[in-house]
Image: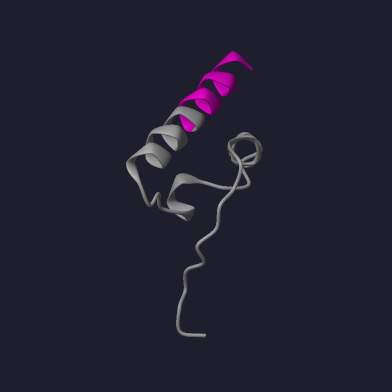
Amino acid sequence: MENNWVNIAISVNALASLIESECIHAVDFKCLDIDSKKTVWKLFLAAVKLTKKE
């Protein structure tokens, strides 16, 4: 297998769940468009806020 990347689509809710459970990290993937990048950053910021509340 020469390609080390897989292009997938994932729901915002599923990604949020993976982020909150620390199963996926920002360094594990890259966003392919600006709207996705904005959404991902919002999800990570929300996860940080949840962590600080605990």
User: Where in the figure is residue 38, as x and y percent of width and height?
Assistant: 38, 33
Name which residue lies at 56% across and 52% down.
9
Residue that lies at the very extreme toward the bottom in this rendered image: 1
Q: Is residue 48 above or below residue 2?
A: above
Number of disc labels: 0
Residue at the (47%, 74%) spot, across then down? 4
- Left or right of 18? Residue 3 is left
- In terms of secondary structure, what is the magenta stretch mainly? helix
| Residue farthest along the top direction in this orientation | 53
Q: By what rule are the colours in the image chosen?
A: one colour
Q: Which residue is drawn at 46% across and 26% down?
A: 45
Residue 50: give x, y in percent of width and height.
58, 20
Quadrant for residue 12, please give it: top right
Image height check: is 48 above or below 33?
above
| In the image: residue 28, left or right of residue 15 | left
Q: Is residue 47 left or right of residue 2?
A: right
Name the spot of residue 39 as percent of width and height, x first: 45, 33
Residue 24 place in picture, x, y as percent: 57, 47
Relative to 6, is 26 above or below?
above
| Near-viewer residue (46 or 35) | 35
Q: Is 52 a magenta residue? A: yes
Q: In this view, does 33 lie above or below 7?
A: above
- Most foreground residue, 35 or 47: 35
| Magenta span of residues | 44-54
Q: Is residue 47 magenta?
A: yes
The quarter of the image holding the C terminus is: top right
Q: Which quarter of the picture shows residue 21?
A: top right
